[in-house]
């Protein structure tokens, strides 16, 4: 900047060449005389008079003037476009001239920076003239910036007193502060003399919003979905939820997406727009959960006895709730079995559903075996419509010596009682606590404030 100002101040004194020094003086106002008189206004006299004037200025190279029937023809080269126009006006104002054909060519040296320097000087003069308005506009802009921050802070505190969540407080504060800033910007542009620009800014705000909305549709959609999620609270941090087949514990909700930690220890990031549009299963909202499993009995067995045995086994399990009570219903008739479906309720916060189901299946199987209820395997049953002849070899034991059912039942009773939980089933406890502990020590990949 200092170097530029030095050039602007020194150029009028030094110049670049002697010819330019002579040209700088009249450059401020190139106005030809209103009338040029010529003695004995004939064509040769007019041409001689004009050619002498052009040569005396030093603004032209090899100027040549010819006149025929009052029409003046000017040839040569002019150093600047303004000089060429000046010569044409001068010839037009000369006595006895009916028309002017200006054939001067403007040729400037590539090292002639006078036009650029003149533009810089004009800009400098305009800057000096507009500096007071600019300073006043800066003061107004600073005042409105402070007013914008003050408005945003007031709205944020008012919404905070009403218990509004942080995201909604920020959105409300920005919604109230943006109009204040736009009004201040409009006043600043008006004071600066840029009325058209002020109208363009205010009118283009809506267009810019439309363009931004189209270009960043997905980002805005996720942002709006985050506002709706934080407002309606379909889940909270630490809740166990399922969304589109993804099950996990909620870690945080940002303006972009929701982070879950699944039971494999992986962080799953789901966009908020997807969450808002999808079906959400919240397992933590109601700790009581129901699960079921199927068991098949033989056609020769009494269904009522099997239902009673299964119900007694399920009801006696310490992890199964008595209210709502468990159920044992006949589901279907299979190829070789009558299928019973067993329903049971448990506390999802304390226990793990798959572990309880594993324990119940073991105990129901043991109960059926104790009471002699068969559980055929459909894949191994073969039906012979015409019967199969059976012959005993000498080495085989006679049928009357085979162990009876009573002996098998006695062997089962001699075995130890089926435990409620085995070491493989991990004491039936829920794994949500372990997942939350892993989430506490793990790095959450999604940056941003938790909106929940």
Image (cartoon, grey):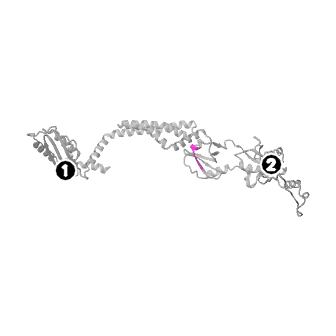
Q: Nearer the viewer, residue 369 or 153?
A: 369
Is there any visible trace of residue 433 in the rendered image?
A: yes
Kindly identify which residue carries mark 1.
Answer: 19
Q: Is residue 56 shown left or right of residue 121?
A: left
Residue stretch in magenta: 268-274
Q: CA distance from mark 1 to mark 2?
A: 118 Å
375 vs 13, left or right, is right
Q: Height in image: 173 above or below 443?
A: above
Residue at the extreme right: 400
Question: What residue is pinned by disc 2?
Answer: 297
In which quarter of the view is residue 137 placed? top left
SS class of the residue under badge 2?
A: strand
Q: Are marks 1 and 2 in contact (CB under 8 Å)?
A: no
Q: Is residue 315 left or right of residue 129?
A: right
Q: Nearer the viewer, residue 286 or 293?
A: 293
Percent across and percent down for residue 301 are 84, 47
- 352 and 350: which is toward the camera: 352
Sequence-first tag of 1 and 2: 1
Q: Is residue 254 magenta?
A: no
Against 379, residue 152 (above or below) is: above
State the SS at label 1: helix
Q: Is residue 271 magenta?
A: yes
Q: Is residue 414 left or right of residue 179?
A: right
């Amino acid at each position: 900047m200092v170097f530029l100002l030095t050039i602007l101040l020194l150029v009028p004194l030094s110049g670049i060449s002697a010819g330019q020094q002579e040209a700088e003086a009249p450059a401020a106002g190139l106005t030809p005389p209103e009338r040029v008189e010529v003695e004995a206004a004939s064509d040769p006299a007019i041409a001689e008079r004009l050619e002498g004037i052009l040569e005396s200025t030093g603004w032209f190279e090899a100027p040549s003037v010819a006149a025929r029937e009052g029409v003046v023809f000017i040839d040569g080269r002019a150093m600047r476009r303004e000089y060429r126009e000046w010569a044409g006006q001068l010839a037009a104002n000369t006595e006895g001239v009916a028309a002017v054909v200006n054939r001067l060519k403007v040729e400037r040296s590539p090292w002639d920076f006078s036009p650029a320097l003149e533009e810089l000087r004009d800009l400098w003069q305009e800057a000096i003239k507009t500096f007071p308005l600019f300073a006043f506009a800066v003061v107004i802009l600073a005042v409105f910036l402070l007013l914008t921050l003050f408005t945003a802070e007031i709205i944020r505190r008012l919404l905070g007193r009403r218990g509004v969540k942080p995201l909604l407080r920020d959105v409300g504060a920005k919604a109230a502060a943006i109009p204040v800033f736009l009004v201040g910007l409009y006043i600043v542009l008006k004071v600066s003399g840029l009325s058209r620009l002020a109208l363009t800014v205010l009118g283009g705000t809506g267009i810019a919003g439309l363009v931004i909305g189209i270009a960043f549709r997905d980002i805005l959609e996720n942002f709006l979905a985050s506002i709706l999620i934080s407002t309606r609270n379909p889940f909270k941090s630490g809740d166990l939820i399922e969304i589109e087949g993804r099950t996990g514990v909620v870690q945080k909700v940002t303006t972009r997406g929701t982070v879950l930690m699944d039971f494999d220890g992986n962080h799953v990031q789901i966009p908020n727009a997807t969450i808002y549009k999808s079906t959400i299963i919240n397992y933590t909202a109601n700790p009581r959960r129901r699960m079921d499993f199927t068991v098949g009995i033989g056609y020769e067995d009494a269904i009522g006895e099997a239902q009673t045995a299964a119900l007694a086994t399920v009801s006696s399990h310490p992890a199964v709730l008595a209210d709502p009570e468990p159920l044992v219903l006949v589901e279907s008739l299979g190829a070789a079995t009558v299928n019973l479906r067993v329903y049971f309720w448990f506390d999802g916060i304390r226990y793990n559903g798959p572990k309880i189901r594993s324990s119940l299946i073991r105990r129901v199987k043991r109960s059926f075996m104790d009471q002699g209820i068969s559980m055929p395997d459909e894949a191994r049953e073969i039906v012979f419509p015409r019967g199969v002849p059976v012959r005993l070899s000498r080495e085989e034991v006679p049928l009357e010596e085979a162990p009876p059912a009573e002996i098998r039942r006695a062997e089962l009773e001699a075995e130890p009682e089926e435990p409620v939980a085995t070491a493989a089933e991990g004491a039936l406890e829920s794994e949500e606590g372990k997942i939350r502990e892993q989430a506490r020590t793990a790095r959450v990949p999604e940056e941003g404030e938790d909106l929940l």
